[in-house]
Amino acid sequence: VVGKLIETLAGGAPVFSAWVGMNEPAVAEALAREAFDAVILDMQHGALDFAGACQSILAVALAGLPAIVRTPVGEFATASRLIDAGAAGVIAPMINSRADAEAFAAFAKFPPLGERSWGPRAALPLSGLDTQAYLAGANRLTQAIAMIETREALAALDDILAVDGVDGVFIGPADLSIALSDGAKWDPRGAAVIEAAGHVVARARAHGKYAGMFCYDGADAHAMAALGFRLCSIGSDGAMLRAAARGELAAARGT
Ligand code: 3PY
Ligand code: MG
């Protein structure tokens, strides 16, 4: 299942991913049973801890999908451990410079792209490859994705995209809107973010890489895919649960 992510990316169709913040493998597994292309587990703002993320990666794999994990800010060593645990990709928030991108890549990739330490505990059996083939394929198989969500990141975008060990970038539209308004406004679909979005898609393409976007629901993900984003997450487990509950309750009450 780990290879499915790069297969979908290589095929050119957008990767539509579920977004999980609950520290509960059964939730990740339930979403993975739907026809998403991947499941993103969020350790930055979600409630997932390391053990929960490891179990959720396996639960998602059991349902046949690749898992991508977003780490807390600056926790590149955790990114490395999550790849060992079988993550098909890691998303690092707040990558603001070439130095940040290089530090991230160093932990996510084996030489010559980085300095990842050997120990693919669950990743190797999940890959279905022998040891040598895993070593040869791991740098491609496991995607390192840098979040662009500040003015600094936009200014350093080409430098970040030029780092060989960074496979793609992912916009955090909420933080980006706060940054671009100097803290005045949460406006993830405002004109400033949409303008930056077009630029990020174009620069990623120019570097032969892909851009992703955090999306709030299915219609939003459809619209962002139409703008050229190739990795679009959809809502969150909590938001979907509450929206479904609200709808059913309204139906029950006839309101
Ligand atoms: C953002 O919008 O800033 C994100 O990081 C998405 O979770
Ligand atoms: Mg963010």
Image: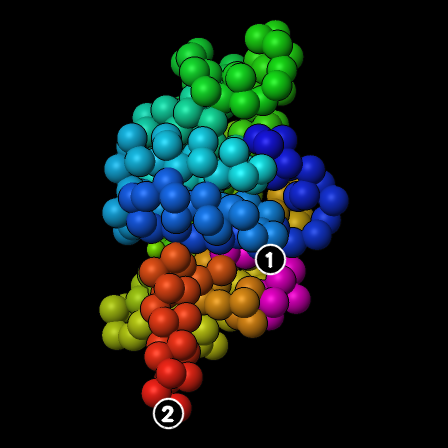
Which residue is denoted by mark 1 in the rendering?
A: 229
SS for dot 2: loop
Identity, as a three-letter code, of the amino acid under mark 2: Thr
Q: Is residue 208 above or below residue 235?
A: above
- The image quadrant where one finds ligand 2 is bottom left
Q: Is residue 220 above or below residue 36?
A: below
Which residue is denoted by mark 2 in the rendering?
A: 255
| Residue found at the very far front of the displayed protein | 252
Q: Position of residue 226 (x, y in %)?
A: 66, 66
Say whether residue 145 is magenta. no
**What is the span of residues highlighted in magenta in the rendered image?**
222-233
Quarter holding residue 241: bottom left
Q: Earlier in the sequence, mark 2 or mark 1?
A: 1
SS for dot 1: loop
Say whether residue 228 is magenta. yes
- Image quarter where the C terminus lies is bottom left
